[in-house]
Amino acid sequence: MKVIKFIDSKNCVWTNKKIKRYMSLFSGFIFTVATVFTAYTMKGVAGNLYLSDIDMFNSDAKISEVYMSKADNDKSTDDVIKLRVCNWEEYIDLGDWDEEELIELSNGTQIIGENSLIDDFEEWYYETYGQRVEVEYSCFGTNEDLYNQLTMGDTYDLVCPSDYMIMKLMAEDKLQEFSKDFYNEEDDNNYYINGVSPYIKDVFETNEIRGESWSKYAAGYMWGITGIVYNPEFVTYEEASTWSVFSNKKFNRQITLKDNVRDTYFAMLGIVYADLLMDEAFRNDEKYAEKLTEVMNDVSTETISEVQDLLQDIMDNIYALETDSGKADMVTGKIVANYQWSGDAVYSIDQADEDGLCLKFVAPKECTNLWFDGWVMLKSGINGNIKRQHAAEAFVNFLSRPDNAVRNMYYIGYTSVIAGGEDDTIFEYADWCYGAEEDEEEAIYYPVGYFFTGNNEDDEYIICASADQIDRQLYAQYPSEEIINRAVVMEYFNDEESKEINQMWINIRCFNINNVPIGVWVVIVVVFAIVSGWRIRKKIVEK
Amino acid sequence: MKKLRLNRKHLCIPYSVFLLCFVVAPLLVIIFYAFTNGEGKFSIDNLVGFFTSPNTIGTLFYSLCIAIVTTIVCLLIAYPIAYILARSKIKYKSTVVLIFVIPMWINFTLRITALKEILTIIEGNLAFHPFLNTIIGMTYDFLPFMILPMYTTLLKLDNSLLEAASDLGASPVKTFIKVSLPLSLPGIISGIVMVFLPSMTNYVVLDMLYNSTYIMGSLIGSYFSAYDWHNGSMIALILLIIILVFTLFTNKYEEDDHTGRGGVKI
């Protein structure tokens, strides 16, 4: 009988009383949700500060963490430090290599990734400093995603954004300075400062935001330049080695640009300023580097509109804007050239080699974009906790240990900023990758001293590579000094500038209503008239 | 104890909670962002901006074009198939229907990747026909959603009505126009709704088929990645309203024609 009662329709009748009761329940619920939501948003807006100790939305674990961070410094070493790291996807060696992947360098070092670098770090930290640390590792897809996550209130201690995002975060005073100990060259565990390439170190020291050099806040991770990957069967070196390749009618609909406003803007500037950039007087100017930076960071309104006009034309000449598909499309032959970061260029060329296709990489003769990704600590995450900061710095140092840098380079395919200092593992690895066989007939001597010691004449650091490496992986992995001399960092745009540039990008990408041919409008009007006429007629007939 | 007894209505609670947290609350946030500016003050600049910029209106136009053309193409392909399938007397009807449904089981990015290669073989260079490719991709993707609802409605079509129509002297064509078509209208309408709405925003298809023009979905995304939450929310809201109007219209149309002209009141 109970069952019958349950489905009894009387039970379902909405009496006034019931409605009132449910209404009050419902509105009460909405009120609660709204309060919770507002408070949560507020929490995000307030720069992710812990609002109060009674943080009702956080789990118990998080609450205890709040207390922990307050009283951390006087707790025993038994406590586990939680380090929240956010990195690009697939941007760290996760281990699990096959045995035949063992790298045996000629200096006797053997390198193989058994476990992920994250696990290895936790172990290494305990062995070295006698303190347990637990890495909470997560990933982001784009710099903008990371920035949005941070403004929404996600907390990280250590993140790895690209150059311009580091500058933006620096300008917004969101970053935690590295401690003095991090730069202490006496300490053998400070692998970063002892191993970083003098060239990269110099870039980090000379570039400043708000009067402070980057090196105070950021430690490099991977670096490279931008250029063009091309198929030498269809494109000559001369044609590919200029930004104007994108406007070259010969490759109509056979070349891709990046679906990324910054990279594409840079390439367009290279075309707009081509004459100036190739000018001998400009090149031999004493202040060439500074002037080049100024020119390639030109975001004046006139330049932006000039770029827009140029890009509008180029959109009719290129195959597409791509973010990732370009690599595969080169191999399948859909396109003959594409705009690429040097790291991805190495990957493309490797992949094409497997398919028996020879691809090459070239940095445009006008200038190229020097880019890098670097580790920065966030004030909101570290929150004055010295132990956590130490762990974060140690994480950077551990990744900078030459053998770990090699593991990362092997896994990711990009170039580490680490040169190794006293340790020659990194150079041996480059030699292992690209060095010529003993019996090679045509060998080239490729100096990379500028990267390893700061002196390109240094004959210790010359890679003897086989001639078929010319303009291929080696040139992309370690660009020659001549190219590096015209490499320029692209600075971040401030709010006003990025608004203009984004608007330019939207203008390019959107379909403009004024471009609709008049015939289409006529058709629309006619169709509309017929449909409404038919409806009216129908109504009259029915009446 | 008696008061705590579970009532049938209590079964709605899980869904209400879901609805509030994931539908109502985000919607309120979107409305909030849409009508505020960078300083957090009330503003209708975003709304005015949308309707005065030739780019945003153009994007709306372009999205509508894609959606309308896709829907028409799907309709033209799907209706005959659904009709033939539903009316035929073949033995393994459900197996044949399965063939149309199987593509839905495969992840659509995978299908579009395959389509990309096939189209490259046919066309040579995809970059010359971005609009055509998009329509093909969308049709390929959404066709099953059009076939299934029409098939189920046509399956229920009572044969005796058709016999009656021909007994009373109607030609097969007239029978189709006056009886079959009006009776299958609910299926057509739900098919249209299921194809039209997603094809307005499914920018993944455009991305994968190298059409670099923005549609509504990608335009919203571009604003969000430029940290402009206000304009992005406004466009999302406008899109929502367009969809709402469209749904109301189709619902009304459904009710209008559902009963009258077919000669049968269900």
Image (spheres, helix red, strand yellow):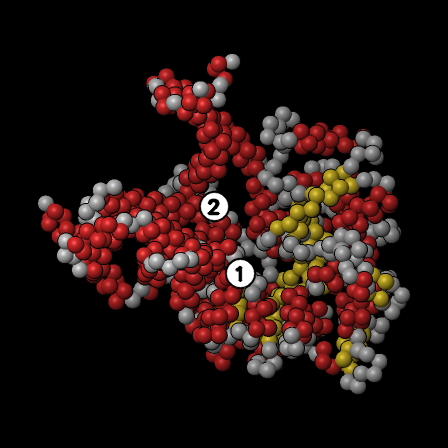
Residue type, label 2: Trp
Determine the chain carrying the residue at label 1: B
Q: Secondary structure at mark 2?
A: helix
Residue type, label 1: Leu
- Please identify the residue farthest to the bottom as the structure is shown: A441
Picture quarter with the C terminus of chain A: top left
Residue A398 in the image: above or below residue A507: above
User: Closer to the camera, A75 or A217?
Assistant: A75
Measure the alpha-carbon separation of dots 2 and 1.
31 Å
**Disc 2: CA contacts within 10 A as few (<14), some (14-19) or many (>=20):** many
In the rendered structure, the answer to whether residue A83 lies left or right of residue B191 reads right
| Among numbered discs 2 and 1, the one appearing first in the sequence | 1
What residue appears at the point 80 percent right and 71 percent down from the top-left corner? A431
Residue to which mark 1 is pinned: B110
Residue A440 in the image: above or below residue B125: below
What residue appears at the point 47 percent right and 33 percent down from the top-left corner? B15
**Disc 1: CA contacts within 10 A as few (<14), some (14-19) or many (>=20):** few
User: Closer to the camera, A255 or B86?
Assistant: B86
Residue A388 visible in the shown view: no
Determine the chain carrying the residue at label 2: B
User: Closer to the camera, A377 or A466?
Assistant: A466
Residue A521, image x and y in percent? 26, 62
Q: Tell us which disc is closer to us: 2 or 1.
A: 1
Residue to which mark 2 is pinned: B229
Q: Secondary structure at mark 1?
A: helix
As drawn, the label of residue A343 is none
